[in-house]
Amino acid sequence: DSGVTQTPKHLITATGQRVTLRCSPRSGDLSVYWYQQSLDQGLQFLIQYYNGEERAKGNILERFSAQQFPDLHSELNLSSLELGDSALYFCASSVAGGDTGELFFGEGSRLTVL
Amino acid sequence: GESVGLHLPTLSVQEGDNSIINCAYSNSASDYFIWYKQESGKGPQFIIDIRSNMDKRQGQRVTVLLNKTVKHLSLQIAATQPGDSAVYFCAERSQGAGGTSYGKLTFGQGTILTVHP
């Protein structure tokens, strides 16, 4: 158990809909990362938050947005969903201000868009 | 059109053998590299990391080798066990626009390791 909690574990929805994925980082970790894992693209970095502020951005679509709340949990919002958005979405956390790529990943939220 | 899934390299070994998983990275400016292991149904799990000012680093049963000249990274697992069966990813720290966060990683496609008892 990594200590990172993601909900829901599975989600099935239709094209055009909007969903919210939730992540609780490990106790004490200030950084939260979102990654997308799909069959054709592999693991791709989406975005990082550190103590409520956006720290780094990857190939995150404009239809997607994220935030980190004062209690450090994070949410990833996916809107106007398309078939190609079907993927595993991972949240990870790391120690505050760490100079390491040792991220602790949750078990992921599997999104299926029909 | 229909998406084509990634065809991951595979490595099959016998229990007790040593395993070597290779990775070619693309960015010559990358200064930090990591290996992750992903078991079925789970998130990636950190194994070992190495900075570009080193060419070798050892952990418990694992060794990472870095050859910057040819942009090659390898993970050696000693006395491989069935519990080592997983997909192994190398990753490099992404630099450039967006900052130099150590958590902003570019992952390779992965290698499937299967260990036979």
Image: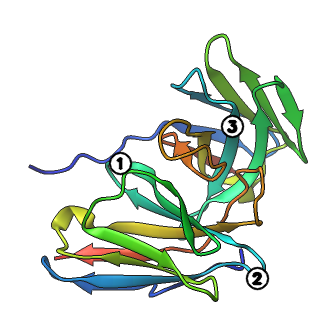
In the rendered image, which residue does mark 2 sit on? A27
Q: Is mark 3 on a helix, strand or loop?
A: strand
User: How far from the left and from the top, in percent, is residue A31?
Assistant: 65, 68
Q: Along the line of sight, which residue is nearer the eye, B96 or B105? A: B96
User: How far from the left and from the top, in percent, is residue B107?
Assistant: 53, 44
Q: What element carries label 1?
A: loop
In the rendered image, which residue does mark 1 sit on? A41
Give the amino acid at mark 2: Ser
Badge 1 and badge 2 in a common chain: yes
**Left or right of residue B102: residue A81:** left
Q: Distance between the residues labelled 3 and 1?
A: 20 Å
**Left or right of residue A83: residue A62:** right
Q: Establish if A85 lies above or below B36.
A: below
Badge 2 and badge 3 in a common chain: no
Which mark lies nearer to you, 3 or 1?
3
Q: Residue at x 84, y 25 (%)?
A: B54
